[in-house]
Image (cartoon, grey):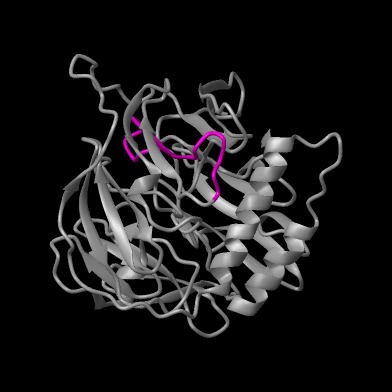
Amino acid sequence: MMDERELRQMLERRAATISATPTDEPKAIRRARRRLALNATVAGILGVAVVAGGLAGLRTIRATLIPADRPTPPPPSGGKLAYALDGDIYVAEWDGSNAVRIADGRCGAEYWAEGLLWSPDGRYLAYRHESCPPDFEVPSGVVISDPEGNVVAEFPGAEFTDRGHAWRIAWSPDSTRFATWVTYGETIGVFGLDGTRHALLSVPPLTSGPVDPSWSRDGRSLLVPPDVVVPLDGSAPYTDSSAHRWLSPDGSRVAFVGDDDNPLLVAEADGSNPQVVFDGPVVVGEPPVVWSPAGDRIAFTSREAGSFDLRVVDLTTGTVTLLADAYGDVLLSVIDFSPEGDRILFSRPEGIGSLWSVAVDGSDPRRLVSGTSSGDWSRGTTTG
């Protein structure tokens, strides 16, 4: 795992490689530089300790709500790709074809993505919204829309207190809520599709980062790496490293990264009978590992001999397959499996980034979208 100093140096080197030539898309370049700068800022404040408390209560905020006569959209019949590009949000076929712009940014970086855009049920998307023209002293807001771009709820930047530290948007397992930092390292907000903030949860001082909250499988707690559990009922946060293991889709097994040289292990759901399935070093990223829908494979990134590698392990045979690699400071990021489990979506964040997919056997690599590394497949059924 990279420490704070290594992470900061890597981000600074990556930022320095982004050129602003006449052929560059101006908004995309501004967006890339801004995100790298924000990443470096967070890396520089990781050691700050913050006093934590309990549940702060409920509060209704300004929101644009879905009209009462608009039916709940059905899940898409086929897998779709959603992505942010040059201040806009698009929805396309799984391979990037037939892209439709559903959020039209009027100025640079007006809309952008953090985390997985699609809700688990595939009905909604969540993405960030800047003021127009952008005011980088004001926190960004959050928009929830259906796949056609009809706004379900909009949470203004005034809801958040930290410019640049409102990071990934984490959907709840039942797709009715999302969570994100309100004040980085201090408080997490839980928001509903009814346009309200349901809870403001305080967290203990962070011991690692940059970190983002995720949901427990039962939707009753938020998990903050490396080992903090924050219950939604307002009870005191507590430490439980086992809660941060990544559960298989059927709940029978967990995957986790070991302490010595960061190997990847799989164990029973209760942590018993751990087995090393890749002898490290695994890169602990966001997300660190991704299970296939059938629970028979795990995709992850590793770092060896100056190379960042995308790999998949077949848990039935134990075979580890190299799918893609990159050298220097280019950090490949695994995003998700296709709903059928036959392909993997990943990003190459060099420059202004690109989205790729590859078959689980390493064949048929395809660049889906250039100019962004922020994308997500819906949970529908894909082909190809």
Residue at position x 23%, y 58% from top?
200
Res. 166 visible in picture = yes
Q: Which residue is farthest right?
A: 22
Is 28 placed above or below 216 here?
above
Is 59 placed above or below 257 here?
above
The spot of residue 325 in percent (x, y) is 72, 57
Residue at position x 26%, y 37% from top?
62
Is 334 placed above or below 245 here?
above
Res. 361 visible in picture = no
Q: Nearer the viewer, residue 216 or 259?
A: 216
The image quadrant of residue 219 is bottom left
The image quadrant of residue 218 is bottom left
In the rendered image, which quarter contains the N terminus?
A: bottom right
Residue 128 lies in the magenta-colored region: yes
Q: Nearer the viewer, residue 331 or 146?
A: 146
The spot of residue 299 in percent (x, y) is 53, 56
Residue bounds of the magenta highlight: 118-136
